[in-house]
Structure formats: structure tokens, C-alpha cells
Image (cartoon, helix red, strand yellow):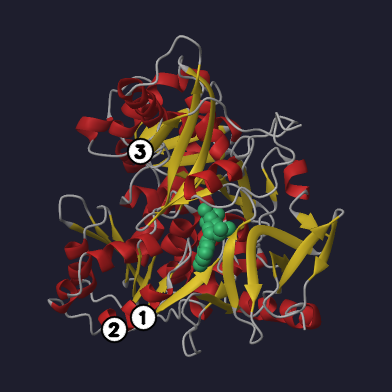
Amino acid sequence: MIAGRAKEDGRAGVWAEAREMLDGLPGGRGLNIAYEAVDRHATGPWADKVAVRFLTKTGSVRQMTYRSLSEESNRFADLLRSLGVAPGAAVFLLAGRIPELHIAALGALKARTVVCPLFSAFGPEPIRARMEIGDARVLVTTPSLFRRKVAGWRHALPGLDHVLLAGPAGEAEGIPGTEGLATRMAEADKRYEIEPTDPEEPALLHFTSGTTGAPKGAVHVHEAVVAHHATGQRALDLRADDIFWCTADPGWVTGTSYGIVSPLTNGVTSVVDEREFEAERWYRTLEEERVTVWYTAPTAIRMLMKAGDDLPKRFDLSLLRFVASVGEPLNPEAVIWGRDVLGHPIHDNWWQTETGGIMIANVQGTEIRPGSMGHPLPGVGAAVGKREDGKLKLLEEPDAVGELVLRKGWPSMFRGYLHQEGRYRACFAGDWYLTGDLVRRDQDGYFWFVGRADDVIKSSGHLIGPFEVESVLVEHPAVAEAAVIGKPDPVAGEIVKAFVSLHAGHANNEELRLQILGHARARLGAAVAPKEIAVVADIPKTRSGKILRRLLKARELGLPEGDTSTLEGTP
Ligand code: AMP
């Protein structure tokens, strides 16, 4: 039976019930994510409960209660209003995991502007491209990120009216073309009444990548909060007395849906760690912060495994009661390692930028099959399909491999790719959303990840579009053509490997290869740039000129090359 089709009415009921768990704006004036996340708690019994504990880079802790987070985000909303930033305008956030990011995200939602968080490890090029596509009106960032990644091209974005710099007044004031956030916040009102908000109004913009073309800005609406809230309970088992640590960066969708929104709507205390991964400090954080529910990623788990099993024995992890992971395939041995070393198996779950929230999960209390992503959550209709002549055929037999498809209509489904209606439409076949992932479903309804249907790369959990990387590579004067692939890596899942052909007159040597890698790193940032490069005589392409990344990958891995009949140059 196709999970989902038979339960069409049931699904709507599940989400209607989830909606009932939320308050809605007072007076029936709609639904606003930030109201559900903070304001409704800020006047009730949880007003003085700690909402977030920010562990800062310097080792200090900055704690915010639901009341203070509500007031500070009110100030940011008021600031946007005083700057004349209208509802619907895009407010970009480019910062590490600092309190101002939470405050600005929630404040911008209150002001009914559209929040777009960017990964602070991006280089100037991915940042510029996304802000251009997203019609950025406001940017909140830090002095250092501004200087290194934005200042050089800011003039190319005439629509960017305000750049607000977070940080101490001494550092964040007086930089040409910017304003100090702290000073403006101090002048703003800590009271703010959210205007009526239509649940279908755009609220969040998250960029993602396909194989070709520019990055895609997935638009999510305020209604998404219904899924953020309910899936926090159903997939992550969040309860109000939990201390929750989501290690994802808010520059990616997990860091927003489950790093900011879901824990707050559920009234839990979140831990936000500004620093990067370090095995010992992470275990210490679990112990000292008394974390009960932990949401992390396979790359981090593999790095912890690498650090050895003696290290965690030095810490008291007895309060931890639920561990979940997302973003890339989770190896079966990692699930078992969690059970043996952390005391809990790791609960893998699946979702993507476009789905806005968790869709498939190993939930608390069900049998885990290590290596499986679990079952669709209540309200989610998932099936395995195959596209044939533009039509979708659902594969009902167990273990058939096909594309994961989801029945339209869950609250956090993306409502469009900004300015790319055709690409959005192409993601649907009738009532089904096509995820681009290949899966199989076993006879007991467990879903297993098989691979991607396209050529995007997942490196340390970050989705990387090959086209964006190739475009920067070919800007190097020596590079004629470029193709990039994901090369399997035991820790990062995949690393970006580049193949380039050279213009005549350039010799293939180590110095040139390092120069090209350096160029890519400076433009794209370390998280996106290739780690390896190979110079080849020609980039294999189809006769119609499409790069055959799959062939390069097969050759790299020593696998059969498959059907090469469309290869350019074949008779
Ligand atoms: P993003 O949109 O950046 O969140 O990336 C979403 C993609 O990450 C999915 O389409 C999958 O390819 C991959 N992904 C997410 N969760 C899992 C998982 N649990 N197992 C395997 N792949 C996953």
C-alpha cells in the first residue's frame, strides 16, 4: 500500500490538530512564527524561563529568557519599521551563532519581512549571488565578515539599503556604508505589536542548489511553524523540560527550523554553541549544559567516533535521553556506536530545504533498523516513484529503488523558488513533490537512502551545487573547462573534487593547481571550494554539451562507466 494515498483525509487532520497546539496571533489576526516562538511564552508562566544559552567564542555564557528574547526581537522589529523596511522585504543574516542572529531572525519575522540566513563560511561569491537573487534590502552581519566578504562588492547591490553590524560599538561603528546594530537597537522600542500576518505570507528564504543553474531560493511561509512545532515533538521528542542542543549552523535550514524555531515554540531551553567542532569540548558541553536531547549530523558523529571511545567515558552523559541526526546518510555503525558509547542509538531522520521540516524519522520508542531513515511522520505521505515520459509511476513493491516523493500539502512545504517558477513547477508531478533523492522502502515501511538522483554534492552535511563551483573555476585565466564531483570521504561523506582542462600555453604543474585551488577558496569559501584538483585533457560531455560528472565519478572510483553512447566524440 502507498503510505499516504489511503490516508489523505487523515493527513489533513493531523496538521489541523498540530495547528491547535499553537495560539495564533491574538484576536484571530493570523499566524506568525515569531509570536509562536517567543511572544506567547513571554507573558505566560515561562516568561522567565531560559530560552537560549549562548556559549560564546570567548567561553562566556549569555543567557536569554523568553521575555528578554521577546523584548530584544521587538526592538529589532521596531528598528526595521523605523528604517522603513516594508513587510515582504528580504533581511539577510550573515553571522556565526551569536545572540544577534536569533534576535534579528525573530524580529524580522515579527516585522513580516523575509528572513534569509546565510552560511558564514561562504566566500564572497556565494554570498553575493544569493543576496542578488534574493533582492536583499537589509544585511545583518559582523564587522569582520563585512570587511572580508561583502565590502568589496557592496556597490553592486544598489537595492541593499542597510547593513547593520553586530558587535561592540567601538568595532561596529564608523565603517563606511554600515550602521552599528547595538546603537540602533538601544534607540528602538522594546514593545512591538505584530501586524496581522497571513499564514501564507513568505517568512523564510533558504537557498539550496541543484546540479545546474544559479542557487535556488526556497520560500517558506509562516504556516511552516505548524510543522516546526509538531515535528519537534514527534521526531525529536521535545518536551518543555528538555535542554536541547542543535549543532547545525543557522546558515542552513536545520539551524533555523530546529536551531531557532522548533525549540522555542516548544518552550525548551536551547544551547547554542558559537565555536566549531572539538570532540572534547562537545562532550563537556553535553555534560555541563545538562543536555537531554541532541540533534547533530553524521559528519560530527564520525568525527566523535574518530576521537576514540575513551574520551566520552570521562564525561557524565547520563542526562542525555535522545540523540538524532540529519543531513547525510548515517552509517549503521554510527547508530550502534551511539547505543554503546552515548547510551542511546542515534535516530536518523530525513528532510531537505524544500520540505522545511522533518518528514521521515526514527522516532522515540520504535525499533531502529541501523542505516534506515525510519518511517514517514504522521501527516506525511511518502512513496517511491519513477518518472516515465513526464508522468510519475508509484512503485508499490517492497525494496524497489526509485525517487522519494511526498504528497503535497504539509505546512512547511516550500511555496516557490524565488523568481524561478519553472524550476518550482518541475518539482511536482500531480499531487506529488519530487525530492530528487533515491530511496527504497522495505516491506515494513522503513525508508532507506540510496543516493541522489542528481549531481549535487554533500560535504560535511552542506549541499553544494557543482555549477556554482565550476563557474568560479573557469574564471581562473588558465582554466578552459571545469567539472566537479563528490568524492567519497570517510569523515565528510564527500569532498569536492575538481577536474579542469587548461587553455593552451599553461603547463600542468603543482604550482598552477595550487593557484587554482587558492582562487576557488578565496571566492567560494573553504566549505564550498574543491579540496582536490586534477588536470585532464578534456572534460567529458554529452553531444548536447552537458558535463558528464557521473562518468568522471565512475572513473575516479574505478567503477564501470555505464552507458557512454551519448558521450561527445563517440561515433
Ligand atoms: P539540504 O536541503 O541542504 O538540507 O539537503 C537535503 C539533502 O540531504 C537531501 O535531499 C538528502 O540528499 C540529504 N539528506 C538529508 N537527510 C538525510 C538522511 N537522513 N540520510 C541521507 N541523506 C540525507
Does the rendering let one see residue 43? no
Residue holding disc 2: 340
Q: Nearer the viewer's eye, disc 3 or disc 1?
A: 1
Residue holding disc 1: 336
Q: Amino acid at mark 1?
A: Ile
Horizontal side of residue 145 vs 329, given as left or right = left
Q: Depth check: give the residue in front, 435 or 538.
A: 538
Q: Depth check: give the residue in front, 148 or 183.
A: 148
Q: Depth check: give the residue in front, 121 or 530.
A: 530
Q: Amino acid at mark 3?
A: Ala
- Contact (CB < 8 A) between labels 2 and 1? yes
Horizontal side of residue 63 vs 205, given as left or right = left
Q: How many residues crowd mark 2 within 10 Å: few (<14), some (14–19), many (20+)? A: few
Quarter of the figure with the N terminus: bottom right
Name the image quarter holding residue 20.
bottom right
Residue holding disc 3: 526
Residue at the spot 70% in from the left edge and 31% down from the top edge: 568
Q: Nearer the viewer's eye, disc 2 or disc 3?
A: 2
Q: CA distance from mark 3 to mark 1?
A: 32 Å
